[in-house]
Image (cartoon, helix red, strand yellow):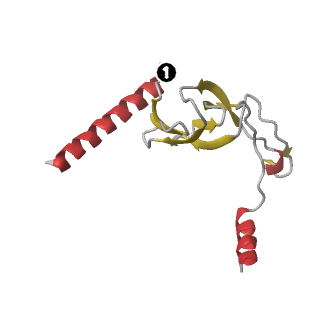
Amino acid sequence: MAEIENEQVKKNLGTLTLLDTLEGHEDRVWCVCWSPSRQILLSCSGDKSIRVWIKQYKEVIDSKVDKEKKVAQEADVHFPYTYRCTQVLDAHTRTVRCVAWNPNDRMFASACFDGSIGIWKVMADSSPNNEEREEEAEEQEEEEEEEGGDKKK
């Protein structure tokens, strides 16, 4: 029975292709987690660090076009972006085992083998889109706090 289930899974997944490999940690990686917007990837490791990876589009996309069909052939289209490590957070004193995003995309938590949980706030840069997102996130947090206060009454 298990073989049938495994074959079905393989059939549903199709062919899997490694698109990119991110390197930088000095020990085993325990967890990776995308932000809700998919713009930031977090990784945590036995090297006691959290790495913050930012989505970065590649400048050149190399693809071949079938002149008769006038379409790019799927096998020839390369992964159009990568993630670049922009920060190494090293506040923990032992292996960082897990990271998890808050749904508002502005905070995340980390769990460490030293018994601590870190709560981190992502600070917006000065671009208008990020400032707008920061304001929206703060408004959403205020609304959630108000709703919570109403429920307590």
Say which of 116 and 12 sits in front.
116
Mark 1: secondary structure: loop
Considering every residue shown, the one lying at the far left of the view is 153
Q: Is residue 137 above or below residue 148?
A: above
Amino acid at dot 1: Asp
The residue located at (65%, 28%) in the rendering is 85
Q: Is 79 on the left or on the right of 97, as rendered?
A: right
Left or right: residue 141 compared with residue 68: left
Question: Which of the pair 116/152 is nearer the observer?
Answer: 116
As drawn, the residue found furthest toward the top would be 126
Q: Find residue 83 and report its image quarter.
A: top right
**Observer-nearest of 21 and 96:** 96
Q: Left or right: where does residue 104 sit relative to residue 56?
A: left
Comparing 102 with 59, the one in front is 102
Crowding at mark 1 (Cα within 10 Å: few <14, some 14-19, many 20+): few
Question: Within the image, what quadrant is residue 65 found in?
Answer: top right
Q: How far across and how far down the image is residue 15, in percent?
A: 78, 58
Relative image position of residue 30 (x, y in whole percent): 64, 43
Q: Is 5 displayed left or right of 146 in the figure?
A: right
* Quarter where residue 24 is shown: top right
* Residue extending furthest toward the bottom: 1
Name the residue at 86% across, 51% down.
Answer: 68
The location of residue 108, given as percent across then percent down, is 48, 37
Location of residue 46 in the rendering, given as x and y in whole percent from the top left corner: 65, 36
Q: How many marks?
A: 1
Placement of the N terminus among the 4 image quadrants = bottom right
Tell me which residue sits at (58%, 26%) in the image. Answer: 90
Judging by the rendered image, the residue that carries numbered circle 1 is 125
Classify 36 as above or below 24. Answer: below
